[in-house]
Image: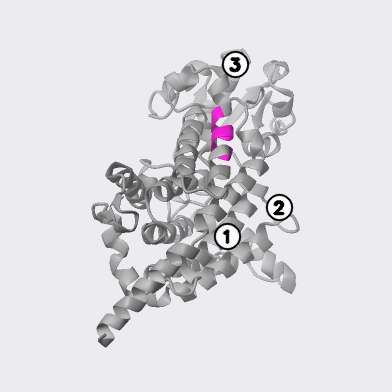
Amino acid sequence: MTDHNTLAFDETVAQEKVAQQWSFPRWWAAMLCVLLAATYRLWIPNSEFPPVAMFRWAAALPDWCSWIPLTGTVAGALWVIAPSRSASSGWWLVALSLSLGFVLDQHRLQPWAYQSLIYGCVFATMRPVRARQILIPLAASVYIYSAAGKLDYQFVHSVGQDFLNVPLGWLGLQDSISPETKATLAHVFPITELVLGVMLLVRKTRCLAGYMVIGLHASLIVMLGPWSLNHSHGVLLWNVLLIVQAWFLFAQPGTNSKRDNRLLYRRLFGLPPRDKAAGRPLSRMGCLISQVLVVIAIVMPATERAGLWDHWTSWALYSPHSSRTSVEFHRSCFDELPDSARKHLKEDADDDGWQELALDDWSLEELSVPVYPQARYQLALAYELATLRDIEKTAIRCKVRSAANRISGRREEQFLLGLKKIDQALNDYWLVPR
């Protein structure tokens, strides 16, 4: 056997070994169950925090359909975890259940849930080696787009400085550095993330970058934990899951061969081949669906700033530039508001009778997740709340703010007084139940 043939044989053996030992899908399914448990209130019917469906027909579905997303996803994940040769069926159940969950309530489009939908389709249709080759560019794009979302005025003057204050506080330097210097130093976070994302795409640096990504998420857990910035449990658990991902996709020994790198983008953009190991063709339609979903998830975040793709599905994570809606109610309607909402009305600073409802605080307490960071969703949430609670038509007003300008941080604003104006504004959006 020639040296060339020996090398090819060794690489084939390595690939088969990865296929036999790759337990990443089961790890993902297990962590998905943990995330669902930590955020279960988001996935069950809630009488006080109204759901915002994507389409009118979805809002008209019977109440029992609201239980399908949680029960179906958990059942599918447990199906995958249990020793079975039909794990693909479990993943299809996960993907379909999550899809229905998103349609019934846009708030469920949490980044980890959206990611799990795509991964579920990939795991359902592809063998381990091919699945890994497809997921590498998608996983790397998360870091690249996340970095791009932070390279702007809003991040370095707000959240970036909050992040920076954590290690500075440990060193006792928090108050000795000017805000201008902190804004400059805050660029370190997105630049590091961007460099790591690019390194993950290069075979020779992928393993090193994988270990560095593990360190990145470990440091985020330290900074975001209850002992520091105190972010939600879902955010912390997702960082744990991304540590698991970094090991299996990037850092695991024997998974970054030259042959593997050559096939990376051929698998992504090429037609699904026959699965010779199984002795039959894989479902070409299923593979094609998975590939299309991955390509969309990689390409469409580039349109986020133009408003064509949502912030969270564009991996704009910890990025305060997102569009948003401020919702205010007049004191005359406070009795109609849910008890859980009244607790999160801000003080009436100018004594004009109007008080803002802190949507993010309300969402965190009632559903254990941050509010979906999209002006469209928050405006529709205000409308659904007002109509369900029979709020007087003129007792609600909203201020819709666009995504912030990357350089100046400025936003365009639109003021809406009354349900009629809010209803008219919602007609400008696609994904609202109008």
Disc 1 secondary structure class: helix
Magenta stretch, residue numbers? 68-74
Q: Which of marks 1 and 3 precedes in the sequence?
A: 1
Q: Which of marks 1 and 2 precedes in the sequence?
A: 1
The three-letter code of the residue at mark 3 reads Leu
Residue annotated with mark 1 = 160
Q: CA distance from mark 2 to mark 1?
A: 15 Å
The x, y position of residue 248, in whole percent, is: 50, 64
Disc 3 secondary structure class: helix
Residue depicted at x 44% and y 67%:
18
Q: CA distance from mark 3 to mark 2?
A: 32 Å
Image height of 419 relative to 103, above or below: above
> Left or right of 172: which side holds 188?
left
Residue annotated with mark 2 = 230
Q: Overall secondary structure of the magenta stretch?
A: helix
Q: CA distance from mark 3 to mark 1?
A: 38 Å
Instruction: Give the quadrant of the N terminus.
Output: bottom left
